[in-house]
Amino acid sequence: MKTISVVTPVHREGVRFLGEAYASLKEQVLPSGWSWEWCVQEDGDGVDAAAQLPTDDPRIHIDSSRRGGPHVARTMAFARSTGRFVKNLDADDRLALGVLARDVAVLTSRSDVGWTTSRVLDLMEDGTTRAFEGDPKPGLLPRGSNFSFWEENRRPQVHPATLCVRRSLLALLGGWMALPASGDTGLLLGLDALSAGWFSQETGLLYRKHAGQITTHPAHRGGSEWEARMSLIQERALALRAWSRNEMPLTASDH
């Protein structure tokens, strides 16, 4: 049986949504010969994810680590996973029907594609949904195309919360960038520097908007922390792009 690993970081503020995330995962129908595992990583003490989830589903694997933020927790969940493909799912979000099957179909049929993303609907607190603006055309995302968009707009063209990645490529990049926020954007631009991606026009994720998410923090979109995050994301992406073109040997001088 081939496995796709779903990795989920969860902290105290988001654990109340974990049951809905599981329900959306349980509804996924995978191609014959495939199964999923769910690696839930508690970010810090006192989360108690097990209280929100059934005890009789052997596909669920819960562990905890010291508080390091969602991107560190995702990477720790990845470290425990076994699947050939790794799918992100935040604890407060919900997968759309059919998304795992679409991700598997692309990555098993297109050897030139290293990662997939999909359309997102924002899930508002009143239960309504809103579309994510600026989606690219569906299909192949040439290597480097997302960096060009990000460099001009300072935001990713596709939603990094929808990423599904080949295991070897994710391991090469060391998982998610260990930043207080935007670590998934950093991963996306690292993937973009090394491999072509794929965008599915079918909705793949319901992205919940609520007061407890880290994107509501004042430092998320401005100030010295934001500047430092954006600078490091850009520097790493440029270094990976140069290295992938054999323009920067690993032994090159830093001076």
Image: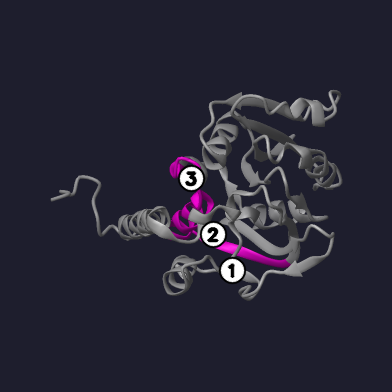
User: Callout 2: 10 Å neighbours few (<14), some, many (20+)?
Assistant: some
> Which residue is label 1 attached to?
140
The residue beneath circle 3 is 180
Kind of residue at disc 1? Leu
Q: Quadrant of the N terminus?
A: top right
Q: Position of residue 94 (x, y in %)?
A: 77, 50
Q: Position of residue 93 (x, y in %)?
A: 73, 50
Q: Earlier in the sequence, mark 3 or mark 2?
A: 2
Q: Secondary structure at mark 2?
A: loop
Query: Within 10 angstroms of label 3, few (less than 14), some, or many (20 or more) residues?
Result: some
Q: Residue furthest left?
A: 255
Residue 21's x, y, as percent?
A: 78, 44
Residue 178 colored magenta? yes
Is residue 238 rendered to the left or right of residue 130? left
Q: Residue at x 58, y 39 (%)?
A: 74
Give the residues drawn in magenta, as a range.
172-201
Read off the residue under disc 2: 112
Contact between labelled residues 2 and 3, with CB atoms less than 8 Å apart:
no
How far apart are the two marked residues, 3 and 2, measured between alpha carbons?
Answer: 32 Å
Q: Residue at x 54, y 37 (%)?
A: 75
Q: How far is mark 3 from mark 1, CA to CA?
A: 30 Å
